[in-house]
Amino acid sequence: MNHFINISDLSMNDLRSIIDNAKKRKKDRGKKSNSQPDSDQPFQGKTMIMLFAKTSTRTRISFDLAVKQLGGSSIILNEDEIHYGKGDETIKDTAKVLSQYADILMIRTDSHKDIIEFKKHLDIPIINGLTNLSHPCQIMSDILTFEESKGKIEGKTIAWLGDGNNVANSFIEAATKFKFNIKIACPNKYQPDKKIVNFAKQNNCAILITDDPYKAVSNADCVMTDKWISMGDKGDKNKKKKALKKYQVNSNIMKSAKPDAIFMHCLPASREEEVTSEVMDGKQSVVWLQAFNRIHAQKSIIEWCLK
């Protein structure tokens, strides 16, 4: 039994095996529709509980399809439908109950601490579907997408522009493990988590943090961004948007990267804020492939967790 909480928790061999298995499963499906199961159905007779304390489109649908393609079933719960989050049942007690009802649990929530607390008391694997600190499933899909588009990610350069949020944190962890270069452009006030940056530096990650977006995208193989205002963001949103304005990914930014650079966005996007429609809908954009690949990356994560 394995838990999938942070990319930094896994060995490079395990991470690579997840990506390679996702590629193989995707190829082996051929032209099957999304609702058809894989031939081997390794999750047959098993159930995943998905607990959502935050709204979701891609995570909800892609995990549901992933479970179905593996031959299993899923139960989707929103925070307002169960006792978790209301204060009338402890996480420990919720975890003990869910362990008896399912074979694996996926949670999407604000609090990373809640994921860690669940892990302590579960008898089944847990997958981090997003927290305020990290979004590891998204990054595994992004690496799968990058390698389908550009070949092995090792030694390549990813540029991140904008808010140093949970997705940026997980990308830093991935750069440390997969040995690619990561250059992050953001204002000082919105830099990634300091502990994660220190983890990367201590493990010889090729990381650059700058306030100059053009310095970040120079020689980049991929340019990536995310919404400037994330779910649960507190404080002056207009002030934050003003601080991030110069980090918009537009045609000038893309021209400063490599000519064959790709553009990524984990979605949802605020068009004309962090990215222009010209870029998002342009020939260098792979955002729709990213979204589709969530299914395949997460199928492989589920398999790995149940080993």
Image: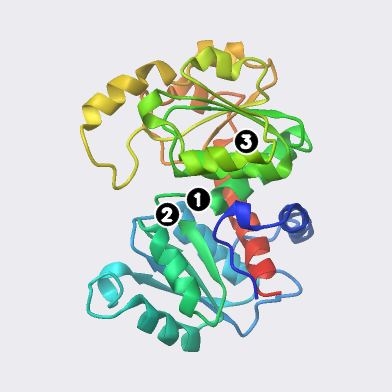
- Kindly identify the amino acid type of the residue bearing the numbered disc 1: His
Residue plotted at (32% across, 36% down): 229
Q: Amino acid at mark 3?
A: Lys
Above/below status of 211 relative to 204 = above
Residue 62 on image: x %, y %? 53, 58
147 left or right of 113 in image: right
The residue indicated by pointer 1 is 135
Residue 49, visible in the rendered structure: no
State how far apart marks 3 and 2 are (Cα): 23 Å
Please identify the quadrant where the N terminus is shown: bottom right
Report if residue 156 is visible in the image: yes
In the rendering, at what x and y percent does residue 201 appear? Answer: 62, 36
Q: What residue do we see at 39% from left, 80% from top?
A: 92
| Crowding at mark 2 (Cα within 10 Å: few <14, some 14-19, many 20+) | many
Tell me the residue that label 3 is attached to: 201
The percent position of residue 204, horizontal first and vertical second, equals: 70, 36
Disc 3 vs disc 1: Cβ atoms closer than 8 Å?
A: no
Amino acid found under the numbered disc labelled 2? Thr
Q: Is residue 135 left or right of residue 139?
A: left
* SS category of the residue bearing label 1: loop
Q: Where does label 2 land, which residue?
A: 131
Badge 3 or badge 2: first in the primary sequence: 2
Closer to the eye: label 3 or 2: 3
Q: Is residue 25 above or below residue 281?
A: below
